[in-house]
Amino acid sequence: MPLSISSHLITRAALIAVLSLSAVKSQAQSEALPAWLQKHIGLSDGQIAPIVLERARAHYFKKLGQGAVKSPCYFAMDATRPSITKNGQPSRRFYTICEGRQTFRAVSSGYGNGRKLPKADFSNGRQCAKHFSNAEGSKLTMGGSYVTAEARTSFKGYHRQSGDIRPFHRTFVVFEGEGETRNSRDRAIGGHRAMFLKWQCRMKMPDSPHADKDGYVPFGRLVDYTAGRSNGCTTWSDTATQEILPLINKDPAALYIYPEGSDITQIRAALKSGKSLGSEGLYWNKTCLAKIGKPQFWPKRKLQPVINRWRRSLPKQPPLELPICK
C-alpha cells in the first residue's frame, strides 16, 4: 500500500476514534445532573461519592446510546466503603438510580473475601476491602463497567422455617463486563441475595422434584451474610434483592463498580509519595483507608498463575458425601 494512502487511512481512523469519544462525552455532558440527584452526592452513609456517580452516569448514557440497555435505572457500587457504620448498621454502598423516576436508593452490599494462600495473601477483612482482582478463583471484587445479563434461579436445598421444611431457591444475575472485567462470566461474577444454605445432611424426600436417584435431598440451615463478604459477587439483603431483581428481570441494566485497577495503582503511588488523595483528584473512603493502609490490585496476569499452581498442589479428595439426617 502506498505511504500516502496508508497515512490517509490512519489519520481517518484516528479522527473517527476522536469523534466517537467526543460524542460519548458530549452525550453524558448534555445529560445535566438533575437538582434532585445532587442532594444524594457526598461521602456520608447513604450518599454516593462524586466520582462513583460521575462514572456510573457516563457508563449508563454510553450504553443507552449504544442501545445495549433500555432500563430507566442504573446501578453503582462503592467497594471502598466499610461494611458496618459507627452506629452498628450495615453501610450502604450499592446504589439504584432511576433518573426518569427521580428515585435514589442506597443499600448494603458484600465484597469479595479473597484467599490466603502459602505464596500470596490476598484475603480481605470483614470491615474493609483491601484487595481487588479479576483473576479467576481469586474470590475478589473487580471494579469497572458491567451490564446485567440473564437471571438464573436455582435450588439450593431444604431448610426448616417456622416448623416447616421448605425449599430454598436463589436467583443469580450474571454480569457481563468489559475491559478488565470482560472475564466476569468466566469467573461466575454476578449479583444475588446475601444468603446461602449450609448443608448438614441428606433428607429422605422421594416425592421432591429435587430428589436424587436414591430419593434424598440436601438439608441444612440458612446463613445470612448481609453486608459481609462474598466469593467475589455483589450481594444484597433480602429486601434489597426483591427491589433490584424486578428492575433487571426483562431488560439489561448498566452497573459500575468502583474502584478500577487503575484507580488503585494511582492511589498506591500517591500514598507512597506522601501526597493526599484529594489534592491528586483521587478518592477512597477515609475510614477504610485508615484501616487497610494501601489498597492492592492483583491483575489476572500476575495472580492467575499463583492460583493455578496452588490448585495443582492440592491433594485429591474423594467427593463429599453428606450423612443421612436423623
Image (cartoon, helix red, strand yellow):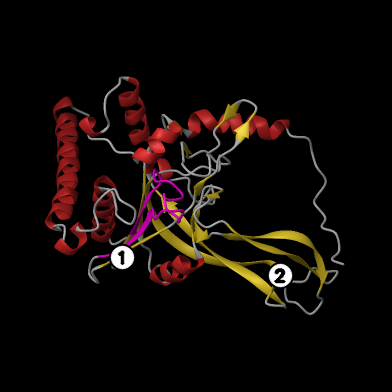
Where is mark 2, residue-wise? Answer: 158
- Residue situated furthest top in the rendering: 273
Q: How many marks?
A: 2
Where is mark 1, residue-wise? Answer: 73
In this rendering, does residue 69 appear at all? no
**Magenta stretch mostly in which secondary structure?**
loop
Pick the residue in front: 205 or 93: 93
Q: Position of residue 25 (x, y in %)?
A: 17, 48
Q: Residues within 10 Å of mark 2 (few under 14, many from 20)?
A: many
| Numbered label attached to residue 103 | none
Residue 96's image quarter?
bottom left
Label 2 is placed on what type of residue? Tyr
Q: Position of residue 66 (x, y in %)?
A: 26, 58
In the rendered structure, the answer to whether residue 251 lies left or right of residue 27 reads right
Pick the residue in front: 325 or 162: 162
Label 1 is placed on what type of residue? Cys
| Residue at the image position 26 percent from the left and 28 percent from the top | 276
| Residue at the image position 28 percent from the left and 62 percent from the top | 67
Which-is-in-front pick, marks 1 and 2?
2
- Give the vertical position of 320 relative to 154 (above or below): above
Quadrant housing the C terminus? bottom right
Q: Position of residue 134 (x, y in %)?
A: 48, 40
In this rendering, does residue 209 appear at all? yes
Q: Position of residue 245 (x, y in %)?
A: 44, 68
In the rendered structure, the answer to whether residue 315 lies left or right of residue 13 reads right
- Give the vertical position of 206 relative to 53 (above or below): below
In the rendered structure, the answer to whether residue 104 lies left or right of residue 150 reads left
Mark toward the start of the polypeptide (1 vs 2): 1
Under circle 1, the secondary element is strand
- Specify start and end residues of the magenta stretch as a single range: 75-98
